[in-house]
Amino acid sequence: MAQQSLLLHATKLDLKGNCGWFKHFDEPKRKANHLKPQSRCRTKASSIQIPSEWYNIIADLPVKPPPPLHPKTFEPVTPEDLSHLFADELIIHETSNDPFIPIPQEVIDVYSLWRPTPLIRAKRLEKLLDTPARIYYKYEGGSPAGSHKPNSAVPQVWYNLQQGVKNIVTETGAGQWGSALAFACSLFNLNCEVWQVRASFDQKPYRRLMMQTYGAKVYPSPSSVTEAGRAILKRDPSTPGSLGMAISEAVEVASNNADTKYCLGSVLNHVLLHQTIIGEECIKQMEHLGETPDLIVGCTGGGSNFAGLAFPFLREKLKGTLNPVFRAVEPSACPSLTKGLYAYDYGDTAGLSPLMKMHTLGHNFVPDPIHAGSFANAFEKHFWAFLKAEVEWCVCSGLLLR
């Protein structure tokens, strides 16, 4: 059986590859040329530079995207229709056809606190699986918020700062996105309010404490603070909440206050393109190790995690320089890609956000409380026609415990 290189994306989970991750942050003190490329277990941060551009996959899509629709008129939205929610520059990113978007130096300076992130070979996992494949994972858990989410939170907050925005609102499920946005707002001295899915608010107090430590105000959603929240509580006072409900509350506050903007942590194109810094780094790191990936695997919820890793490699596949297989894995408790309908739907429970064509389980979908942070919607409209032919979808219902 021929050896293969399998590239995984670990945003929060350390698979404890046999390379002393918990003991040393550098490679063994041996010259690199004493090691064969396939035996190296991680890349040094100094081996590559932080990318200076994000990749925008829209430029390479053979089918152009169907437009978002206004939540009341159902007509295609204009940039003006989105301006009450998002910073102007983020709207430009959302609709841009340019293949690359320059990363502001101020954002790169913040990225340099934890980037480039390591690419690590999971030798113990290879041994456990008794596989000849060489398995690597891109570890994003070293960021100040503990996940890949600051890759988009930092530029979103920075662009809002340039526009003079004072307050940022958002939703969060388990708390990764809320923590990332609270961190970014603390760097640029913006106020941050977060509506966290009630089940996660109760189950994960330490994530709430992290957000509060960074200065954010955190509400359990649904809350009595907003009209949308009060209406939901009236219908079901014991609801565990959902991301759709939390989005409704944050969008309502942004829509009603001129000095406030809304930030989203997944699904939208401008979020996904910010995350491509992961894949851009990974391409350089694989080259540094002398490896070519045969299979690229990533977990999917709203899509930012998988897109961040996969989209730059998809570009190279279209160019003919690489030919990997892509596999997107989602939870069976919220199978929007494998079981969802590809259709226009709201991104929130109350129907305040624009309708987008995407994989959806329905904007009223409420998952089991243990999965209350799961997205009922995945991947924005324009990726479907392209990704359907390029990516294998599958579901996972188990947990990796070893």
Image: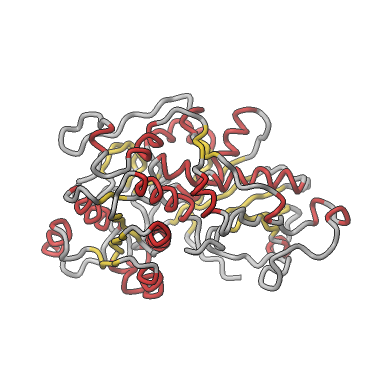
Q: Quadrant of the C terminus?
A: bottom right
The front one of 87 and 340 is 87
Residue 270, x across and y down, in percent: 41, 41
User: How did the renderer colour the structure?
Assistant: secondary structure
Left or right of 321 in this view: 36: right
Left or right of 60 in this view: 268: left
Toward which corner of the image does residue 92 lie, by quadrant? top left
Residue 64, x across and y down, in percent: 41, 25
Residue at the spot 73% in from the left edge and 52% down from the top edge: 133
Residue at the spot 46% in from the left edge and 55% down from the top edge: 149
The front one of 156 and 147 is 156
Left or right of 232 in this view: 266: right
Residue 341 against residue 151 in the figure, above or below:
above
Residue at the spot 38% in from the left edge and 36% down from the top edge: 94
Residue 6, x across and y down, in percent: 67, 50
The front one of 155 and 317 is 155
Residue 213 appears in the picture as rendered: yes
Residue 337, x across and y down, in percent: 42, 45
Residue 104 against residue 252 in the figure, above or below:
above
Residue at the spot 39% in from the left edge and 67% down from the top edge: 214
Number of callouts in the render?
0
The front one of 172 and 215 is 215
Residue 333 appears in the picture as rendered: no
